[in-house]
Amino acid sequence: METLGGHAARQVLRLCESAGLSGTDSAEYARTLLTVLGPVAERSLDLPPDDSSFLSDDHTPVEFSLAFVPDGEPTLRVLLEPGYGAASLAENGRTGLRAVHEMAQRWGFDTKRLDELEDLFFPPSPQGPLALWCALELVPGGVPKVKVYLNPAASGPERSADTVREALRRLGHRQAFAALPEGDRHLFFALDLGHWDEPRVKVYLAHHDLSAAEAAGLSRLEGGPGPGEVASFFRMAAGHGTEADAADVEADTEAAYGAQGPGLVRRPFQSCHAFTETATGRPSGFTLYIPVRDYARDDGEALDRAVAVLGRHGMDAGPLMRSLSAVTARPLQDGVGLIAYLGLAHQQGRPPRVTAYISSEAYEVRPPAAAVASLTAAVL
Ligand code: TRP
């Protein structure tokens, strides 16, 4: 019987090896993934997924990513939902908190900053699209760097802004909320926990209908990134360099799903604002995320976009291609969504990073956009 944990652990093992981690580290990280997932790892892939999870499109509670730097090997990361499959969002959150506390014990870090926020993000009857996710940066040595993602809408979507403001305030970032740009929704509130040089507090905003110029205007960093750099990333990743292509994909998607969808026709763009110090009141990090899967016909096209973006930043796309083959044997043209997002991250004092998010596809491969349209046409 194929299990969720078996599937994901095999992927992580192959990804670690292809990222050049030692055999010992790779095996250790595969075990860590199973530990953090807990009993859910044993879940048969024949059972339907927990469709309340939106960690990934097919509701796999695991997503991989690579963070590229101009000089050096990319870092492999994995995003996980420890409370996946819980009977309620409250239970999902409790399981998530337990998993984080177990990690803290195992790797010797403190969770004070998370514990201080518990009432805000874990009310008795939480609402919203998630309870707790965590991400691990699989650095050499077998001890990952840990990030925790919380849900600003936990106490109600209408309270999201207040929740974010209060959480920032409790962590000493009193002016941070006022420094954030406008957005359509607060999506995540994230904390770096454990062994970081400069642990960040991050606020993620959703933006619908963003233009390249508007995207470039979202950064609140002092001294960069240049608007040209952000706008060109936006165009390269979303394919807006060729408006005709974008219109085609949109027409195909709408033909398949209708303009209103079941669910979203296109996911919003996201911006992330990272705070590391409390003196200036300004963020020291800015990231823009493009849901490239909603702007490409298939993963071949998504990969082309990634390769172009990486090339533009002087980064080698080889590790991305190897990672895709480590995760799946399917031809890239046979689906869309293996590459879920492309991101461009700026952190003050460091070179920009390009991030690529890779789906596990444990449950499902989304058909290519054009194929969906013609399939619908055939059925009609
Ligand atoms: N799957 C969710 C989404 O598409 C959340 C998510 C997973 C996400 N990985 C991400 C959001 C990377 C931004 C970037 O929104």
Image: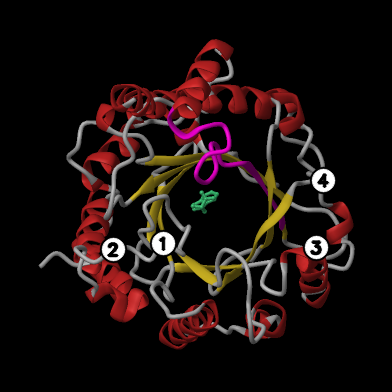
Which portion, as a residue range, is magenta?
256-274
Q: For mark 1, does the 10 Å Cα neighbourhood hold few (<14), some (14 to 19), or many (20 or more) residues? A: some
Q: From the viewer's side, name the closer residue of 21 and 181.
A: 181
Instruction: Locate residue 218: give its quadrant.
Output: top right
Between disc 4 and disc 1, whose residue precedes?
Answer: 1
Q: From the viewer's side, name the closer residue of 268 and 276.
A: 268
Q: Which of label 4 and label 1 is nearer to you? A: 1
- Report which residue position mark 3 lands on: 161
Up-down relation of residue 30 to residue 274 (above or below) = below
Q: Can I make out residue 159 in this image?
A: yes
Element carrying mark 4: loop
Up-down relation of residue 265 to residue 32 (above or below) = above
Q: Residue furthest left?
A: 1
Query: Looking at the picture, how far across and down is residue 267, in whole percent?
Result: 56, 41
Instruction: Tell me the amino acid under the disc marked 4.
Output: Glu
Between disc 2 and disc 3, whose residue precedes?
Answer: 2
> CB of mark 4 within 8 Å of CB of mark 2?
no
Q: For mark 3, does the 10 Å Cα neighbourhood hold few (<14), some (14 to 19), or many (20 or more) residues? A: some
Report the side of 299 relative to 127 (left or right).
Answer: left
- Report which residue position mark 4 lands on: 182
Q: For mark 2, does the 10 Å Cα neighbourhood hold few (<14), some (14 to 19), or many (20 or more) residues? A: few
Report the side of 367 relative to 14 (left or right).
Answer: right
In the image, residue 61 lies in the stretch drawn in magenta:
no
Up-down relation of residue 128 to residue 183 (above or below) = below
Element carrying mark 2: loop
